[in-house]
Image: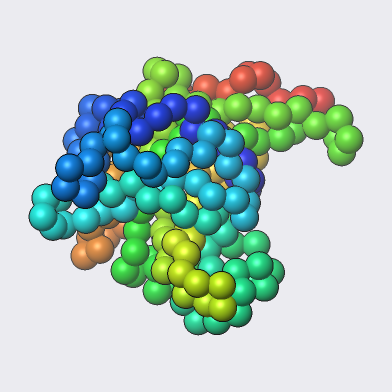
Amino acid sequence: MCNAYNLKTNLAEIGLATHNQLGFDLVFPPGIDAASSNTPVPQAVYPRRDGLILRPIAAPHPGLEPALAHWNLTPYFHTGPLNAWKASTNNCRSETMATSPAFRDAFRRRRAIIPATSFTEWTGPAGRKTAHAISRADGGLLFLAGIWENYVGADGPKITYTMVMIAAEPGDDVAPFHNRQPIVLDADKARLWLDLSADTAPVLGAATPGTLLADPPQPAAA
């Protein structure tokens, strides 16, 4: 499962890619734009660290709101400190997201897009593993399906999120490196994913072969 990704860019570039690749614009408070926003863009993201998500907002203008969030979804029913939630919920299997107690409410009500320049998978033997940076072959930004939650606990409010994973099938770009992969969104899939009334089945498939590129390009020997 994906346990690391990078976002080596800035809000202005994310906004441009979001507009060009997905047809959405980023939305900021009045008087604020991508250049003046103080929303951080963490460059290297690991579980239980903060990352950037894009969540839909309808008013006053529809678009995607950038938000800093904690990568390891903490469900609404957890009331203790954030670090007391011990489950590894940074990844969510698509097969169980609608039924899992930890994820089902967020899946029904709170979906998001996770921007990334690359995500990392490892191959090879323990102690000598090779990290493979997987990015778009065309140089574009990755937009990945996610769900988010408003955690309010003993240490205050926090936005948390998880990445939705699907099985990697033979022929998929990620299959040589792992048997699960994030959902890569194009414009059509992004609109379906964010439409809470839509059937998500068309979203839950791998990107067209050749969409993704791994560096190094071959798995390490076991």
Q: Residue furthest right?
A: 127
Locate residue 30, reporting x and y percent. 16, 47
Viewer-proximal residue among 153 and 134: 153
Residue 51 drawn above or below residue 36: below
- Residue 79 in which image quadrant: bottom right
Viewer-proximal residue among 46 and 100: 46
- Give the residue at x 50% y 81%: 77
* Colour style of the rendered protein structure: rainbow
Q: Residue furthest left?
A: 60
Locate residue 114, reporting x and y percent. 42, 45
- Give the residue at x 38% y 23%: 140
Viewer-proximal residue among 75 and 31: 31
Q: Specify whether residue 206 is in view.
A: no
Q: How many marks?
A: 0
| Side of 222 where 191 appears, left or right | left
| Side of 54 where 89 appears, left or right | right
- The quadrant in which the C terminus is found is top right
- Give the residue at x 41% y 59%: 147
| Side of 191 where 113 appears, left or right | right
| Side of 50 where 184 appears, left or right | left
- Give the residue at x 62% y 45%: 46
Locate residue 113, reporting x and y percent. 37, 47
Residue 82 drawn above or below residue 71: below
Viewer-proximal residue among 66 and 120: 66
Locate residue 129, reporting x and y percent. 80, 32
Q: Specify whether residue 218 is in view.
A: yes
